[in-house]
Structure formats: C-alpha cells, structure tokens
Image (cartoon, grey):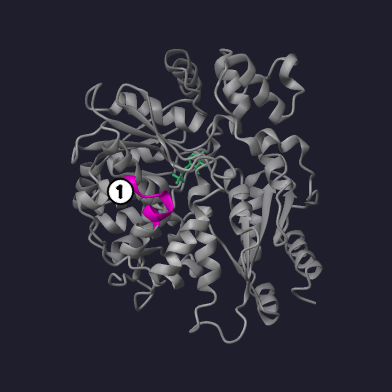
Amino acid sequence: MYDSIEYLDTRGYTETPLPFSTVIIKGLAAGGGLFVPEKLPQLDLTEIVKLASLPYAQQAALVFDRFGIDFSANVIDRLMQQAYGENFDTPVIAPVVEVAPRSYLLELFHGPTAAFKDMALQCLPWFFSLALEKPRDAAGTPMFHLILVATSGDTGSAALAGFRDREHTGVIVFYPRDGVSDIQSRQMTAAEGANVGVVAVQGNFDDCQNAVKTVFNDAAFTDVLAGQGVKLASANSINWGRLLPQVVYYASAYSQLVASGSLELGEQLDVCVPTGNFGNILAAWYARAIGVPIGRLYCASNDNNVLTDFINSGTYDISQRSFKLTPSPSMDILVSSNLERQLFELNGHDAGLIRKWMRELSEQRRFQVDEATFAALRESFSADWVSSEESLETIREVFQQFGYLLEPHTAVAWKVAERLRMTPDSPVLIVATSHWAKFASDVYRALHHMAPGEALPDEVAGLSGPQLVARIAEQHTAGSIPQHLAELDSKPIRFDETCANTAEAVSESIVDWLEQRRLID
Ligand SMILES: *Cc1c(COP(=O)(O)O)cnc(C)c1O
C-alpha cells in the first residue's frame, strides 16, 4: 500500500482535499475548477523498464496503486484485468510500431470502438460504479447515476461501450443528427447493453450540446429526478478518472521501446500528441513528472490552432477566432478545458492566478500567463499546426513511403513531429489516436489526391461506411480492419429516436428512458 494522494481544486473553492473515489464521481469541482493530485508519486527507471515484462492490466494496476487511489490493491488488480483484456484486439493493448526510422507510433485504437477514448473509458466506469458503493456515501442502495453525453464523435460510442452493464449507472448519448460520420452513427445506434440509450438531436453539435447543458443546469428537473433516486452525471474528458488511465500507456510505451532495444535505458524520448482538449498530452506531461524519461512534448493542432499560438506567445486568445471544421474533428476545439490543469501544475498550484485567468477568458475571451509560468511551459512544450490539405497529403505520403495508413488526427501529429524533432534521428513517439477506418471518407480523399471536403466520386459515393472501408482496404492493401467495424452493417439498429434541439425535448427523452426501465414512475 502506498500513501493515499488526495486532490486539490484548481480554483481553490473546495476546502479540503478529496480522495480519488470522490473526485471521479464529482467530475468537476463546485465553482468550475478541476481536480489535480496534491503531490505526485515517483517511479524509478528499473521499475519503468520492468513494466514491459508485465501484462498491460498489471502495468496499469501498478501505476494506479502508486497514485495512492483509495481502492485496495486487490480491487485495482481485478478491475484492471476487466478493463484491459479480451475487449482489446491485441494482448499488448497499446503497441508501439516503428513506422519510419526512429519514428514510433503508439497505437491507441485497439479497443472496442477503435479510438483512443477507449483507453480511459474501458477503465473509468469500473471505478465509477464501485465508488458509488463506498460505504461512507451509500445509505442503503447507491443512487442511480445517469451519465449524459453530448458528442460530435468518438466519445459517444466509447462511453456506451464503457458504461454498458456497469452497476448503478446508465448512459444516454445525444449526438447531432447532421454532424457525425456514417460509421460513428452506426456504432452508436447499434450499441448493446440494457442500461444504454442513444438519441439523435436535430441540428449541429452546438445545438445538441446546448440543449444537454441546459438540462444539466435545470435545478427543478434535477431535483425531481433526485427525489426518485436518480442523479445526472457526466464522464467528460476533464474527469480525473479519464486522465489517470492515459498516464499508463506512456510509461508502457517507454518500457516497450527499451525492451525491444530501440532505446537505451534512460535515453530521452520526445512525444508528439494530436491535441484537442489537452487531455492526452497532459497525461504525457504527468508520465514525465513521475519519472518516465520523456524529453520534449510536441503539441500538434489543426486549423483551430489556438494552442499553437498560446504555447508560442503565452497569450490564449479566442477573441478574434472563428471555429473551423477540419478532417480531424476531435481536435476542432477553441476552449481546451484540460489546459487549466496544466497551468495549475506549472504555476506552483496557485488557484488565485487560475481564477483570474479563467475569469479573463470568459469575460474578454483572452488571458496572458505570467512570465514564470510561460517559462515553465516553454521548458516542456513546443507546438505547431497543420492545415487540412497538408494533413491529407501526409496520409498519402506516409502510405506511399512506408506502407502505413494514418488517419487525419494522427497525420497532423506525424507532420508536426517531422517539423519539430531536434534531428532526423532523435527518437519520437507519435500518438495514433484512431484507426483509419473511422475516417474513411477523408482517407479515401487523401489516397486519391482529392481536396478536404470534395464530393466523393460516384463509384464510392453510395457506399455505406463499412463498405467504403472494405473498398479502401482492397485497393490499397492497408492492413487489417477491426472486426467490429467490418461487421457494423449487419448489426441491428437499436435506437432510432430523433428529438428537437431544445432542453424540453432532451429532458423528455431522459424521462421516457428512465420510465421504460422503471427507474422512476
Ligand atoms: C479526443 C481525440 C483527440 C484529442 O484528444 P484530447 O485528449 O482532447 O487532446 C485526438 N484524436 C482523436 C481521434 C480523438 O478522438
């Protein structure tokens, strides 16, 4: 047993530090802050290299245990075996592949929905449902927690797969009817499990998200539900329970590279991450902070390059920016919510400064960090961005040169790594966040020298998502396709409800769903 580590609130409104089990249920602190560990464990090099000889589940258990979470070592071991087992299509779970000399790809798409959100969402729900049973909170039966997700992409299917049949919980995903790909909507509407629900919302992602947010903040509605034993909850990427599982794969990747002889023990490895909400790259920063020999962190963005400008100037400014749609939609973000955690870590845990910056961001749409924080940021991070055209060109070039098919998010990171790496032969780990099959239309455009957004030619325009994937794989011998994606066409659609993009319509679907399952009457 290691010392338990408790969590601080980045805005300082939470009076006493809280344990892991409490912060994962809360998600966000009252007052809008995020939870951050009060101190960090340290792993030494011999421990890190030994990870490669353990199954991934045990690597994860070791890291969770060292983070002093308030579950017993036995419970952690058991949960990790369930989180990282047969549900992944490779026993390595997060394999590292050398695609070009000293360019290593960390493949995080081997989970049940073929995108990296699985790495955390196959894990968090086990802890979540067990945390609800912690005796000090539970008088009798724990409250039923209904997770609401508004998603424009990968989070929906990953949350459905992760919370499926987890006790005391349910999950309803709301997605914009006009804003997800064919594969993504099939993945969601065919989701299995007794405690899941999926609703298409008329309009775009903003409409969908606003309606769901309004329901969350509707005290009258949440009071009525609470009176019947139901609490609304979220599992978005600011939940610490989604961040901690991501630290594991950086330690794992390093140990794999030492075990395969690609790295000398202690040699520094730079890491390049395609970034949206700053969660994945922050996990790399934590991995380095606990002792993994990571060198520089390369923050890769698409046309929505607010983070590139921030890391290069110290000023975060969205006052003049418009939101752009790109082939890498999971990085189409203007307010990068996990950045707040990173700034708290770099400014010496100064909640007063965080409150000031976040107030400026909401009032003036910009803030500038002080010099010490900026220097600390520059010490760890470099940043660059890639246009939509360049990201598709990169997919084509890497496929022609090395025979490896990237998808658009990973292509952004590939290009940025190429530009920012110190020398052509300094080792760099590029994080692959999705399988190419989930973004088949743009991969097709890339391989056929087409522009982003250009209409697909007649011969493929009528194909379903899975058929297009099969066509690309046939024509380009692009390796294996995850079985569950290939079979999507034949899976029955379980959810075909569409609702208006109003809070009333969303709360009505929630009530219907709860009544059908006799969770309320
Ligand atoms: C979510 C996502 C990202 C961005 O990750 P963050 O942790 O939000 O920075 C990148 N690529 C894909 C495919 C994603 O699903």
Q: Magenta stretch: residue 50 in it?
A: no
Q: Give the labeled residue for mark 1.
A: 285
Residue 163 picture location, percent across and down: 61, 59
Left or right: 224 as drawn, with respect to 137? right
Quadrant in which the N terminus appears: bottom left
Quadrant in which the C terminus appears: bottom right
Q: Identify which residue, 265 or 500, lies in the foreground.
A: 265
Residue 281 picture location, percent across and down: 37, 45
Is residue 303 in view from this perspective?
A: yes
Picture residue at 52% right of the left edge, 36% below the top: 434
Q: Which residues are magenta?
A: 51-60
Quarter holding residue 412: top left
Left or right: 259 as drawn, with respect to 76? left
Left or right: 120 as drawn, with respect to 445? left
Q: Identify which residue, 78 or 433, lies in the foreground.
A: 78
As drawn, 129 above or below 326:
below
Task: Count the labels in the image.
Answer: 1
